[in-house]
Image: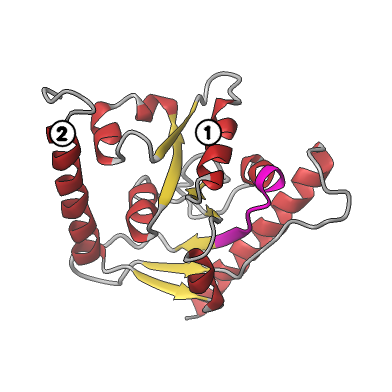
Amino acid sequence: MLIKEGSFIYKISGAIMRGILWLGIHIGYRPKVIYENKQVKKLLKKQAVIFAPNHFDYKDGPVCYFLFKNSSIMIAKDWYENKAIRWVTYGKDAIPLDRYGLDTGWLRHAVKMVKDNKNVIIFPEGYTSDNKEIDKFKGGFAMLSVMTGAPIIPMYIDGEYNPFLGKRLRIYVGDIEYLSEENKGMSSEYLEKECQRIREIVLGLQEKSRKG
């Protein structure tokens, strides 16, 4: 980009682009957010949460970021290095993760976001699933919940991205989930158990979407 990062024009133009993308997502995909529990909407106004959605399409990230206010989103570091992405996300709403090396910096960054009362969106599968099957959940979101005490909001995104015509995109938002207190900690056994529990909830939301 020719505009200097951090400058007044950079910030204003980024805000304008965010507005354009927000409008484009709402007009193009007509997303419908379906809450299992209306109390989740009230909770979002009071404290930070950790969103844990499935991941079928690269558009899932932008949609979640623009639909759920006051949120930061974890993205691959190689994507974060794209100047356009930093421009659109203020450069601070994205949490970069190095997919090809040992990286714990993202966790410190995410903890700070939660402490600053910002929601964090993490796709626990770590990559998109082309066959519409929800893969095994990795433990990053559970680690963040252990460290911050923030509740987890499981979500299911149906992946129906039909621009302007056809079925609307539907996002099913699960109930408020807290980690089990039994043997709570950072052990691999505990994290794996909690990951599987949250994944089962997302699978249940997927089943509801197919029936509804």
Vertical placement of residue 141 versus 168, above or below: above
Horizontally, is 133 left or right of 177 in the view? left
Q: Residue at x 34, y 66 (%)?
A: 169
Is residue 151 part of the magenta span, yes or no? yes
Vertical placement of residue 96 versus 198, above or below: above
Mark 1 Cα-neighbour bin, 10 Å: few <14, some 14–19, many ≥20 = some
Q: In which quadrant of the rendered view does residue 177 lie?
A: bottom right
Distance, label 1 to label 2, CA atoms, is: 25 Å
Q: Which residue is mark 1?
A: 109
In the rendering, at what x and y percent does residue 75 appear? 44, 36
Mark 2, secondary structure of its residue: helix
Q: Residue at x 53, y 20 (%)?
A: 100
Q: Which residue is mark 2?
A: 8
Identify which amino acid the numbered label 2 is placed on. Phe
Task: Decide which of 95, 193 is in the foreground and name it.
Answer: 95
Q: Residue at x 23, y 28 (%)?
A: 6
Residue numbers of the magenta segment: 145-154
Q: Are marks 1 and 2 in contact (CB under 8 Å)?
A: no
Mark 2 Cα-neighbour bin, 10 Å: few <14, some 14–19, many ≥20 = few
Q: In which quadrant of the rendered view does residue 26 lie?
A: bottom left
Task: Decide which of 203, 182 is in the foreground and name it.
Answer: 182
Residue lying furthest top: 101
